[in-house]
Image: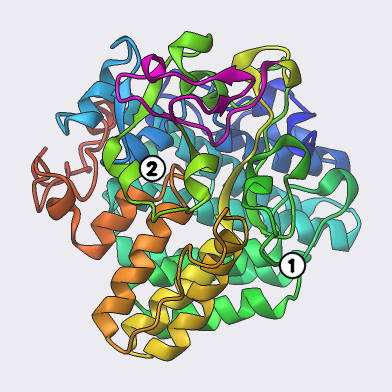
Amino acid sequence: MKSPYHLLFIAVFTLASCQGILDKDPLGTLDVNSFFKTADDAVQAVNAAYEPLLFNNGNNNFYWAFGVVTYDEAIAGGDGSRAGIVELDFLTHTPRTSEFNDFWKLQYNGINQCNTVLEKLPGIDMDEALKNRILGEAYFLRAYYYFLLTQVYGDVPMLLKITPPDELKIPKTTKSKIYQQIVEDCEKAAAWLPAQHTGGNVGRATSGAAYALAAKTFVYEKNWAKALEYVAKVKALGVFALVPDYEDNFRKNTQNNSESVWEIQHANLELGVGNSLNQWWRSKKVQGYGFCEVTQEFVDAFEVNDPRRKFTVAKNNEDYFGFIYKNSYSSTRFSVKKYLQVDTTVTQAADGDINYTAIRYAEVLLWEAEALAELGQVAAAQVPLEAVRARARAQSDSTATALPMIVTTDKQEMIDAVRHERQVELGFEMHRFFDLVRWGIAKEKLPDFQVGKHEVFPLPQTELDLNPALLQNAGY
C-alpha cells in the first residue's frame, strides 16, 4: 500500500546527504524554528524521520549486505561493481568501505530528525492526541535507529538532543547504556502509540512495535526474563497472529497483515521511495543486478518438504516471477525470492513496493521459544516453536510427515532447534549474521571470522577523521 511517510517531501527535511554528521549544521539550527508552527508541520516532520528506513537507491542502505552477504546465506554475486559487498562477502572490509559510511550517516540523519521532532513538537498548539502519537513515533524511530547502529558498530556516540556542530565531537557510548535508552524510548513510545493504525496511517509505528523492539533488545542482552516480559506485552495487545499462508508476508497485496509487527513501507511512486532490492537481488538473467546469490548451504538447511524453501529460494525449473528459473540464473544455481515481485506490478524494477517486515510475529514467537529454552523451560519452549512449525507444515505437500514436532527434554537440543527454526523461517530477512554473533558461534559457520574483531563492523574512517574523540573498533 502507499505509505503515509512517502507522501510529504520538503527541502528543509531532506535527509540524504553526501556529508558526515559533523560536516553540517544540525537541522534544528536552520529554519526549523520558523517551520514548526502547525499540526501539519509536525506530521511532515515525523514523516521525514521514516525516510532513512527505506531500501531505496537514494538511501544507499546496505544493512541487508551486513546481515546476509557477510553470513553463509549468500555470496556477493553481481558483477563486482560494488566492491564493498565483495569485501563483506570475504570479511575483508575496512573503515574505508563506503557502505559503512553511508549507513552511519543514514542512521544519524534519522536520529537527528527524531531529536528535532521531540524538542520542537511540544511547543506547537495542536490536538493533544495527535501530538502524543507523533512523539511516540519519534521515540520509537530513535530507538530503532540506535538498535541498528549497535548491531552494526557496537558502541556509538549517543545524541539525544539537537546538537550544534561544536558539541558533536563526543566519544562512543557503551552498548549497554544505549540498550537502556532504547528500552526507555520504547516504553515512552508504547504509552503514546495505538496498538493498530487504520487507513492512511497504516505503516506507522505502534505500541506493539515498541514493545517488540524492547523485547529484541533484551534478547540481545541475554536478559531472558525481561525478554519474556515484553513478549507478553506484545501478545497481550491481541492484534498479532500468524497468517495461514507464509508467503502472504512477502506479497504486494497481503502486506501489513496480522503477522506484521514492524514493517518498513515501500511504494512504487517513481519517486525513488520504492524497494530497490527488487533489482539488486533479482537474477541478471531477468534484468536484475544479481547480487546476493543463495548458497547451497542455506538451501540444505531446510528439512525435507519444508515449503518455506520454495517461498524463499528459486531453483531449477521453478517459477521465478513469470520466468522458469534455470541453473544459469545464478553462479550458485539458486536465487532469493523474498522482497521481489513480478515486473507487471511495478513501473520500474528499482522502485518496487514490497515492504520489509523488520519484525514479524513469527519472530516474536521464536524469541519466546529461545528465552524459555535458555531458561531451561524446555517443555514451555516447545509451544511457540511448534506454532511456527505448524504453520509451515500445513502448507507442505506432505503434512503427515513434514516438519515433525520437536519433542525433547534436553535444553541444548531445544536451543539448537530454535536456532535452526530462525534460520529457515527468517531466511534473507537480515537477521542471520547478527544471530550468529550474539550466539557466539559465528566462527563455527564462517572460517574467516576473527573472534574479537568481526562481531562488529568498523567505524567509518570519515567519522574518525572528523571526530578525534572516536576510537576505532578493535582489529580495524
Is residue 169 toward the left or the right of residue 283 in the image?
left
The amino acid sitting under disc 1 is Trp
Magenta stretch, overall SS: loop
Instruction: Work out whether 88 lies above or below 286.
Output: below
In the picture of the structure, the residue carrying the numbered disc 2 is 167
Q: Where is residue 356 in the image (x, y as percent from the top left)?
A: 59, 41
Is residue 311 toward the left or the right of residue 403 in the image?
right
For marks 2 and 1 on the same chain, the one whose residue lies earlier in the sequence: 2
Range of magenta residues = 315-343
Asked if labels 1 and 2 touch by Cβ distance under 8 angstroms, the answer is no
Q: Residue at x 39, y 56 (%)?
A: 303
Q: Position of residue 301 (x, y in %)?
A: 33, 51
**Nearest to the observer: residue 103 or residue 230:** 230
SS at mark 1 in the image: helix
Is residue 280 toward the left or the right of residue 472 in the image?
right
In magenta segment, residue 247: no
In the picture of the structure, the residue carrying the numbered disc 1 is 192
